[in-house]
Image (cartoon, grey):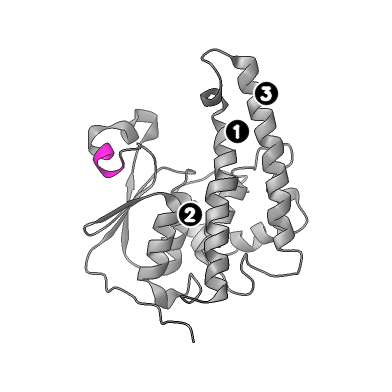
Amino acid sequence: MAAPQRQRRHTTMLRLHYYPSTASFAPHIVLEELGVPYQRVLVDREQNAHKSTEYLKLNPNGLIPVLEDGEVVLYETAAILLHLADTHADAHLAPPMSSAARSEFYKWLVWLTNTLQATLMVYFYPERWVSAGNMAGAAEVKAQAEARVGVLLQQLDAQFSDGRPWLLGDAYSAADAMAFMLCRWTRHFGQPARDLPHLGPYLQRMLARPAVQRAIANEALPQPWV
């Protein structure tokens, strides 16, 4: 028998430090799914607010997002999603502890973070991987990263080839918010996630969720959404 999930009663306001269309979008969706009170704190990247002394006290990496839950201060999107799922277990945004489905949940959340998102970061910031001023090298890195993302999207698409509605099967989870966010980042690619046979319908199912629509509206995201 799987061990029961433990839920901590919240006595403080959750605060999500975010910027539209960044890695804070998945936690934003999950907070809307939970339907709990929370505050959104805009970190204005255009003004380099994520590099400010105040923000670096929350996240020394100078990256978005950060979640404050009382004395708990978390960065790294996957960690935030796990925390929200575990502290709101009655929302069932993660499978039960010690279950096989929970292991799958961990696998996909780590894969999305360490494999797909990491490759997307190479695509969006290719200049980090070449010498300063090497524009031709950066262009080559970007092209190779886009090709690699395409392979990874095929792998993700295959997960839905059995007709499952959600990443883990019949049950929606916080991993779906992560998958949706990363697929959305490919919307301007030559071959975006929406064009794949199984990911396309999956992304439409995600868009139909009221929590996703609320997060989109909150961030005033322009179309195309995926």
Which one is earlier in the sequence, the residue at label 3 or at label 2?
Answer: 2
Is residue 146 covered in magenta?
A: no
Distance from the alpha carbon under mark 3 to that under mark 2: 29 Å
User: Per the image, is 57 magenta?
Assistant: yes
Q: Which residue is mark 3?
A: 140
Circle 3 or circle 2, nearest the eye: 3
Q: Residue at x 74, y 59 (%)?
A: 158
* Observer able to see residue 14: yes
Q: Nearer the viewer, mark 1 or mark 2?
A: 1
Residue beneath disc 1: 123
Range of magenta residues: 55-59
Q: Residue at x 56, y 70 (%)?
A: 172
| Res. 225 visible in picture | no
Instruction: Identify which residue is drawn at 58% across, 59% down.
Output: 108
Marks 3/1 in contact by CB < 8 Å: the verdict is no
Res 26 label:
2
Q: Residues within 10 Å of mark 2 (few under 14, many from 20)?
A: many
Q: Amino acid at mark 3?
A: Glu
